[in-house]
Image (cartoon, rainbow, N blue to C red):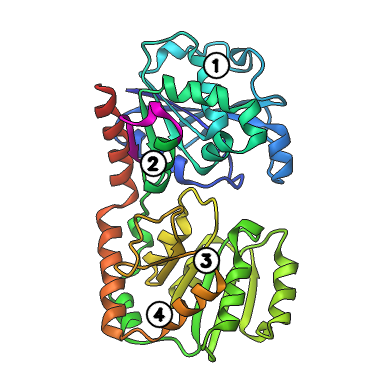
Amino acid sequence: MRILVITDLYPIENSGEPLVIKEFAKAWQEEGHIVDVIRPNFLLNTKIRHKKIFKNGVYFEDNIKIMNVNCITPFFFDVKKKLPKDFAIGNYNLIISHMPSGALFAMKLLGKCAGIPYVISVHNSDITVLTKPLYKKFFAPALKKAYKRADAVAARSSVLAEKIKELSPYAQNKTFVAASGINKDIIDSMEIFEHKAKYKNEPYVITTVAKLIKRKNVDVILKALAMSNLKDYVFKIIGDGDEAENLKNLAKELDIDDKVIFTGNIPHNEVLVNLTNSDLFILVSEGETFGMAYLEAAARANIVVASKNDGIDGLIKNGENGFTCDADADTLSILIDRIYSMPRDEVRRMLLKRRCELLESDDKALSKKYLDTALKIIGV
């Protein structure tokens, strides 16, 4: 099968985008499919996000063809003129789009090609476009047409699946969850899990990994720690962003700056080492599509606290294999104290349950499930 993936979230030369969609594409390729990618790139968005701009043209990574298309306006033009001359939409058996820009580009390409199966994937940005006044006026009508045209809807989490069913009548009977898995090589050994289940670090180590922007709610974690009963602990904040200085100042105001370490951005392998040396991972961000950081933290034997009714909620089941919590400092501080005081046999049960789940739903298995489920709904 020839598959065309259309998304601005596909990375070129480690350009900063998440690797999830790239991992999907590589897994499908390993199954024997031919996968090409169109990467529609709004130049204004790219500059606002401080990301690298690549020239229009064709790139190859992992034997996958990536057609980078730069554009100033949101596709009020003949998109085919930006693509290679030999490009033909009819050469593909399946079109999969991720993100609103990917959906809009896909619709421009598909036109009246009713016979080509199309899967639209739901991210949190889709919900934003469909609900926020500014986006509703300019882009929501076109996005709604994409949901109507789509043969299947791949929601990136169970929370997003429910939201899109509420917002679009066309999603009711063709929506499924396309969750991400994790590379098994990242999962720590049973020996490490058993050791961390038996012993707490002294001081107790709490970690978050996030871009330091407002919606990540790292300030809520700082406030919760200041309110908690914990005395001997270290809070590592891995990442950087516009809120970094504000968060450093907040830590001083709360008089916990001696317990907070800002690492800035560090290489991925160092992130994993830090997570192995951590007891508890907390991220109560808003507007999270999925959140690979949660999976990586769990894979490194951390008790995980995730956002309630957002992102990975559904895979993290409160009190069973981790915890979910609102972005509220009072509530979070109580939860932190509860986790710190948990009996070690309960910590062990929770950590090993999550490890087993990760092993059973690795990235390759879930990539295959994504494609198989889409094709089943489509009837291919």
Q: Quadrant of residue 215?
A: bottom right
Give the quarter of the figure containing the C terminus. top left
Disc number placed over residue 161 in the picture, else none: 2
* Structural distance between the alpha carbons of marks 1 and 4: 50 Å
The answer, for residue 140, to whether it is visible in the render is yes
* Structural distance between the alpha carbons of marks 3 and 4: 23 Å
Label 3 secondary element: helix
* Structural distance between the alpha carbons of marks 2 and 1: 25 Å
Which residue is label 3 attached to? 271
Which residue is label 4 attached to? 339
Mark 3 or 1, nearer chain start: 1
Residue 309, given in percent of the width and then of the height, sits at: 44, 55
User: Label 3 crowding class (10 Å Cα cut-off): few <14, some 14-19, many 20+?
Assistant: some
* Structural distance between the alpha carbons of marks 2 and 3: 30 Å
Mark 1 or 4, nearer chain start: 1
Q: Residue at x 37, y 65 (%)?
A: 299
Q: Amino acid at mark 2?
A: Ala
Q: Residue at x 29, y 65 (%)?
A: 355
Mark 3 or 4, closer to the camera: 4
Please provide the residue range marked out in magenta: 167-177
Mark 2 or 1, closer to the camera: 2
* Structural distance between the alpha carbons of marks 4 and 2: 30 Å
Residue 204, given in percent of the width and then of the height, sits at: 48, 85
User: Label 2 crowding class (10 Å Cα cut-off): few <14, some 14-19, many 20+?
Assistant: many
Residue 276, given in percent of the width and then of the height, sits at: 43, 73
Q: Amino acid at mark 1?
A: Lys
Residue 200, given in percent of the width and then of the height, sits at: 40, 86
Q: Amino acid at mark 3?
A: Val
